[in-house]
């Protein structure tokens, strides 16, 4: 019985360590906008958004030159004390043999209950070759 408790506790500790490491990666991505390739929005001029940061980010992505129409696999919202809001939206890519995923970073300034778009960027997760997220296209 003690053996099972030990295995159970070990599993919980390993799972917690994985979650913490994932959060560190996301936080690093949130802080460093320079680690993302710029996403252009030449087709539309965005007005301040009154919806949730998540919905505002999805609106930006749909209006972007990347024409992101699908629903993200994961969305994270980060609030900073300086009224800066950053949304990370991650998409899994199944139909491309070189790209396994795409991640978008959308930044807003919050003023008077509205979210003003600042910038958007994207990263790629390559299916082969380099590991992790990169702003460079996958080989």
Image (cartoon, rainbow, N blue to C red):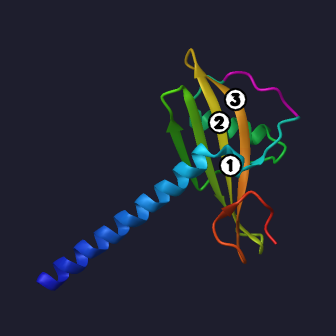
Instruction: Give the Cα separation between the discs numbered 3 and 1.
Output: 14 Å
In this rendering, is residue 86 above or below 9? above
Which residues fall within the magenta stretch?
43-48
Query: Predominant secondary structure in magenta?
Result: loop
Mark 3 or 1, nearer chain start: 1
Q: Residues within 10 Å of mark 3 (few under 14, many from 20)?
A: many
Q: Which residue is mark 3?
A: 117
Label 3: which secondary element: strand
Specify the label residue 43 is tagged with: none
The residue to which callout 2 is attached is: 107
Which residue corresponds to mark 1? Answer: 104
- On the image, the x and y values in percent for residue 43 come to 88, 34
Q: Residue at position x 53%, y 46% from top?
A: 76
Q: Are marks 3 and 1 in contact (CB under 8 Å)?
A: no
| Residue farthest along the left direction in this orientation | 1
Q: Are marks 2 and 3 in contact (CB under 8 Å)?
A: yes
Q: Residues under labels 1 and 2: Cα distance?
A: 10 Å
Is 35 located above or below residue 43 in the figure? below
């Amino acid at each position: 019985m003690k053996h099972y408790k030990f295995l159970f506790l070990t599993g919980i500790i390993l799972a917690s360590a994985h979650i913490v490491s994932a959060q560190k990666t996301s936080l690093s991505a949130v802080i460093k906008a320079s680690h993302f390739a710029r996403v252009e929005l030449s087709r539309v001029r965005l007005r301040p958004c009154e919806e949730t940061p998540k919905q505002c980010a999805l609106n930006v992505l749909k209006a972007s030159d990347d024409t992101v129409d699908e629903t993200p696999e994961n969305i994270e919202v980060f609030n900073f004390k300086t009224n800066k809001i950053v949304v990370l939206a991650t998409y899994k890519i199944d139909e491309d043999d070189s790209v396994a995923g795409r991640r978008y970073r959308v930044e807003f300034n919050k003023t008077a209950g509205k979210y003003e778009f600042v910038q958007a960027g994207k990263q790629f997760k390559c299916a082969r070759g380099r590991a992790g997220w990169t702003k460079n296209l996958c080989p």
